């Protein structure tokens, strides 16, 4: 065989061998990365659409704690046994996740909640019209603003966008239903809330995922609307709730409803002043009884929608009444059970679960939904905490004539914790938390005995660059120097960073070229977490910033917002580019609302002034006056941008 042919064959063999080694390395690394298994849907009939694909496994994103609310830290509910099934990595509190619900559900599966959810209620978008979520746009801005790569309108919640094709919507719901089935307990129930737009298709999906044999009821929620003159069809006066179980022994508590002639039962209500479920009495203090007939509640529920003057109203689109959620939560769960709602909206499911002694987990991708829910939960928990304090100081006398079992329902928790999933606030992260985040997200194994390398990924050493700056040539030179003092070290190196200077790519390319020539023993690979598709594009949360002048003058507090910037809004506008990119001429275009608390205690923000213009062509004032409290106080100014991000500025006067 000619020498040139032998040389060509050896070169080809070496090239193939390198490719095999690279594939083997990538395969080992993939095994290390944390994933969760998802079982296939086996129900019939099966709905088909273009691009239908099941999910067999999913990458897990870690959660980062962002805030908590513990107004009564010394409180214990006296029923510690209800937390025996709770993962130790989470506090015994309500859990509120900010992030895409698919990523949150995968996170819950990977962190101890598989098969532990007793009741799931979801109120997903009904159709391709984005009437489900509040419409968000910059103030006084014209032009089409889209997010690059996802074609979502700026500020509009991704899950409720109005440009979905029908097939994309079905795939979206299919994936989430598969994950919800994995989380549901064997005796658990799931309620899917829908209407005439997608009800028939979603019912088919539920049959496929949960099985038609597990269908329990199709409940009609009937409410009152009015037939308008000029309409060419009957008015739509109902929604549908599809109820499915997971197994044969589904939890169901017999429900009753008042009728004219039946046995008497005490009337009960939620008392906003005391924060508990109480018996209703007349003006003379006598108990009020309702006549009930057992079994009256059927599959048509006549419950009024939330009126304009209702105390429940949050002005959140499609907010559901508490009476609706109360009925299904009381029917299909017991005190202490876990209730999950992954389409949070205004937070009604979590609020009702909190009132009726259930544990709860909820999530939403929309910051406005998170903020609305936090405010509602704070109000309820503060009332409940006040009641519990009084009960501890003055224990109730048992055996009284007007007490029954429902009077004993107590909160399962008097706190909640907020987490971010794949939207991390790294401004305050320390190195230990940073390393743990990478271990969980990338699949790295921690090394605590090495002074330079933080871990191992497959067989490769891992060096993590601090997240407060991009990777530089100096960081890579440090890796080079460390390898030079370890001449026997033959393992390759992975450098993990959050952003990098352009010159670093050239440095690494030159290094790996020398390695291929046999002049260096170690290859170097970069993982840039914000852009690397293999690791899911770990996202970084950027805080909004504000410059606010706060001063006391002649018995008044004067507040003047001098400047405000939202890095997230600016970045999204830059990503779009083009001739139609809206220009921000002043900071108030980015601001949704301003609130002021003149006596901020550092824990609970109490609204004294709220400036939230309803029309999008109107601006917040930016300048405010309020009567100054006596003595020293801390003034807090909360500014919320159009995407729901907020900044809190405080000053002691």
Image (cartoon, helix red, strand yellow):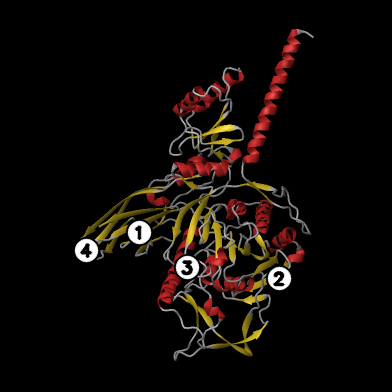
Query: In the picture provided, is 373 more to the left or to the right than 325?
Result: left
Crowd rating for badge 2 (residues with CA inside 10 Å; few <14, some 14–19, many 20+): some
Q: Pointer 4: what residue?
A: 555
4 or 1: mark nearer the eye: 1
Judged from this view, the residue extending furthest toward the top is 2
Q: Point out residue 413 in the picture as x, y percentages from the top left corner.
A: 50, 66
> Residue 23 or 489: which is nearer the viewer?
489
Label whose residue precedes the other's in the sequence (3 or 2): 3
Q: CA distance from mark 2 to mark 1?
A: 48 Å
2 or 1: mark nearer the eye: 1
The numbered disc on residue 76 is: 3
Q: CA distance from mark 4 to mark 1?
A: 23 Å
Q: CA distance from mark 3 to mark 4?
A: 43 Å
Label whose residue precedes the other's in the sequence (4 or 2): 2
Q: Are marks 2 and 1 in contact (CB under 8 Å)?
A: no
Label whose residue precedes the other's in the sequence (3 or 1): 3
Q: CA distance from mark 3 to mark 2?
A: 37 Å
The numbered disc on residue 591 is: none
Q: Pointer 1: what residue?
A: 602
Relative to 647, residue 377 above or below: below
Helix, strand or loop at mark 1: loop
Helix, strand or loop at mark 4: loop
Q: Point out residue 101 in the picture as x, y percentages from the top left corner.
A: 58, 54
Q: Pointer 2: what residue?
A: 217
């Amino acid at each position: 065989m000619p020498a040139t042919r032998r040389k060509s064959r050896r070169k080809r063999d070496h090239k193939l061998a390198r490719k095999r080694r690279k594939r083997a390395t990538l395969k080992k690394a993939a095994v290390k990365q944390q994933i969760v298994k998802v079982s296939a849907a086996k129900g019939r009939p099966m709905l088909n659409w273009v691009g239908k694909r099941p999910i067999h496994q999913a990458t897990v994103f870690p959660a980062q704690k962002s805030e908590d609310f513990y107004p009564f830290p010394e409180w214990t509910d006296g029923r510690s046994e209800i937390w025996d099934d709770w993962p130790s990595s989470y506090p015994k509190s309500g859990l509120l996740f900010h992030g895409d619900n698919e990523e949150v559900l995968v996170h819950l599966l990977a962190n101890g909640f598989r098969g532990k959810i007793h009741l799931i209620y979801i109120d997903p978008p009904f159709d391709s019209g984005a009437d489900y979520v509040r419409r968000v746009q910059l103030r006084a801005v014209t032009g089409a603003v889209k997010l690059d790569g996802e074609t979502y309108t700026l500020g509009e919640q991704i899950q409720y966008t109005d440009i979905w094709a029908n097939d994309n919507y079905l795939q979206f719901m299919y994936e989430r239903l598969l994950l919800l089935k994995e989380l549901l307990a064997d005796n658990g129930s799931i309620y899917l809330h829908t209407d005439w737009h997608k009800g028939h298709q979603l019912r088919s999906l539920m049959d496929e995922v949960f099985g038609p044999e597990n269908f329990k009821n199709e409940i009609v929620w009937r409410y009152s609307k009015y037939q308008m003159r000029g309409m060419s069809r009957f008015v739509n006066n109902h929604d549908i709730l599809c109820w499915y179980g997971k197994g044969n022994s589904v939890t169901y508590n017999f429900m009753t409803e008042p009728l004219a002639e039946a046995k008497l039962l005490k009337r009960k209500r939620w008392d906003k002043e005391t924060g508990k479920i109480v018996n209703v009495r007349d003006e003379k203090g006598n108990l009020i009884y309702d006549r009930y007939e057992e079994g009256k509640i059927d599959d048509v529920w006549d419950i009024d929608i939330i009126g304009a003057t209702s105390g429940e109203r949050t002005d959140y689109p499609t907010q559901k009444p508490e009476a609706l959620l109360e009925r299904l939560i009381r029917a299909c769960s017991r005190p202490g059970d876990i209730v999950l709602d992954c389409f949070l909206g205004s937070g009604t499911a979590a609020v009702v679960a909190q009132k009726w002694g259930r544990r709860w987990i909820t999530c939403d991708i929309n910051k406005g939904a998170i903020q609305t829910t936090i405010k509602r939960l704070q109000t309820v928990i503060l009332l409940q905490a006040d009641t519990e304090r009084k009960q501890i100081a003055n224990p109730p006398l048992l055996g009284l004539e007007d007490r029954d079992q429902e009077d004993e329902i107590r909160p399962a928790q008097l706190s909640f914790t907020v987490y971010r999933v794949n939207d991390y606030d790294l401004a305050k992260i320390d190195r230990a938390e940073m390393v743990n985040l990478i271990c969980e997200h990338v699949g790295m194994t921690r090394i605590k005995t090495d002074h330079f390398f933080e871990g191992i990924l497959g067989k490769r050493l891992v060096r993590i660059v601090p997240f407060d700056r991009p990777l530089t040539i100096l960081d890579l030179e440090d890796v080079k120097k460390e390898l030079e003092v370890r001449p026997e070290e033959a393992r390759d190196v992975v450098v993990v960073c959050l952003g990098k200077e352009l010159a670093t790519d050239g440095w690494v390319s030159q290094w790996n070229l020398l390695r291929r020539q046999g002049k260096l023993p170690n290859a170097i690979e970069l993982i840039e977490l914000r852009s690397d598709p293999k690791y899911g594009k770990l996202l970084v949360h950027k805080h909004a910033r504000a410059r606010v002048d706060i001063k006391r003058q002649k018995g008044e507090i004067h507040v003047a917002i001098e400047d405000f910037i939202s890095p997230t809004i600016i970045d999204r506008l830059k990503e779009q580019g083009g001739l139609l990119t809206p220009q921000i001429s002043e900071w108030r275009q980015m601001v949704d609302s301003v609130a002021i608390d003149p006596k901020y205690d550092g824990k609970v923000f109490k609204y004294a002034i709220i400036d939230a213009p309803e029309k999008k062509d109107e601006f917040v004032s930016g300048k405010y006056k309020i009567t100054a409290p006596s003595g020293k106080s801390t003034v807090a100014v909360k500014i919320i941008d159009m995407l729901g991000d907020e900044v809190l500025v405080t000053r002691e006067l």
